[in-house]
Amino acid sequence: MAAVVIENLVKTYPSGHRRATDDVTLEVSDGEFLVLVGPSGCGKTTLLRMVAGLETPDAGTVRIGERDVTRLPARHRSLSMVFQSYAIFPHMTVRQNIGFGLTMAKVPRDEWASRVARAAGLLNLGDQLDRHPAQLSGGQRQRVAVARAIVVNADVLLMDEPLSNLDALLRMQFRAELKRIVARLGTTTLYVTHDQAEAMSLGDRVAVMREGSIAQLGTPMEVYDRPAQRFVGGFLGTPPMNFFDAVVAPDGHADHDKPVRLTAGDRVIPGPARLSGWAGRPVTVGVRAENIEVSLQDGPGRSHAEVEVAEPTGAAMLLTVRWGGDELKVLAPAAFPARPGDRVWLGMPEHALRCFDPETSLAL
C-alpha cells in the first residue's frame, strides 16, 4: 500500500475560461479511505482522473508512495479503478472478468484461480462465477467491477461514483459491504461521489470540493458539525443547514459575564461567546434542523413560528416553519402533533449555532 500526495494540481478546461482544479493540494495517508464530495462540475472526477493517469495536469505533481507519477502512464502507477459504468466485458464470465487484470499480468494459473476465488468470496460472487454479465442484476455487475479492481492488489484503489447506478436500497446495502471490504484490505482508497450520505458513511476523512478547490477537509463529523464555510453547511446534510441573518447585540461586549445575544428581526437568541468582539455587526447564523428544539408550548428562550408543511419521514417529522421572515427546516419527533397553520415554539441552543461572516462566508 502507499500514500497519495497531490501538490498544487491545476487543470484548465479546454475552453480556458475556468479551472477544473485550482491549485489543489491533498494527502491521502497509507491505508486511508478518503472521499471527494461536491456538486457536479466541482472538479472531483477530474482530480481523480489525474491521479489515475487518465488526465494530464497543467501544473503540479502527483506522488504515489515515493514515486512521482505525474507523467507516468496509468498502467505503470500500481492502481486500480472502478468507474461509474460497470465497464465489464459482456462476452466473458464473471470469473474471467474478475481475473482479467491478472491475465494481462500473466499471473500463474494456480495463483490466478486462488486470487479470483478470494475476491469473489469477498463480494459474495462465489456462486456466480460461471455466469455472464447479462445474467446478473445491476448490483451483481457492480460487485464484479469492484472484485476486478481489488484482485490485482494495487497500491491505490480509485472509485468514481461506483454506486450511482444502483437503486436507493441496494446502494445503502452495498455501501456497508464496500466499507467492510476496503477496511479488511487496508488499501489506500480515493472515492468520488456527489452523494453526501455516501461521503459521510464511507470516508475516514471527507474533502468537500467547490469550483475546483477544496472547501474543507476533515472527518465526516468535523465537516458536518463545524463547517468552515457557509457552502459546506449548505451542501452537507438532509435537510441542509438552516441559515438566517442576525446582528450581535450592541451590549454583547460590555460585560463578559453576560451571554452574547443575537437579534434576528424581533427575535432574540443566545449567541456563541466568541462573538463578543462583534457587537453591533451582522452575522449569518447556521443551525441544523435536528438541533432546533420544537414545542407546542412557550417557554424560556423560545420564540414562536408557524408550521407551513409537515412531512412524516418515518423516523422523524420534518417541519417547514415560518420563523419571522425566515423559513426553517426542523426535525421533530415522529409523533409530533403539528399541522400546517399550527403555532409552535422554537429553541436554539447556543452550542448548536454556527456563525459566518456575511462578506466572506467563512466561519467565525
Image (spheres, grey):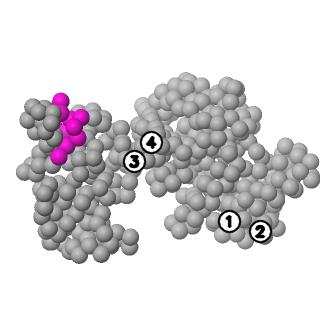
Q: Earlier in the sequence, mark 3 or mark 1?
A: 1
**Within-10-Å neighbours for mark 4: few <14, some 14–19, many 20+:** many
| Image coordinates for residue 30, horizontal then vertical, percent | 64, 36
**Within-10-Å neighbours for mark 1: few <14, some 14–19, many 20+:** some
Q: Earlier in the sequence, mark 1 or mark 4?
A: 1
- Front residue of this view, candidates 297 and 234: 297
Which residue is denoted by mark 3 in the rendering? 224
SS class, disc 1: helix
From this view, report whether residue 205 is shown above or below residue 73.
Answer: below
Q: Are marks 2 and 3 in contact (CB under 8 Å)?
A: no
SS class, disc 4: strand
From this view, report whether residue 133 is shown above or below residue 2.
Answer: below
Q: Amino acid at mark 3?
A: Tyr
Q: Is residue 314 left or right of residue 128?
A: left
Q: Report the disc number at residue 140.
A: 1
What span is colored magenta in the figure?
270-284
| Image coordinates for residue 131, horizontal then vertical, percent | 78, 69
Res 2 seen here: yes
Q: Amino acid at mark 4?
A: Val
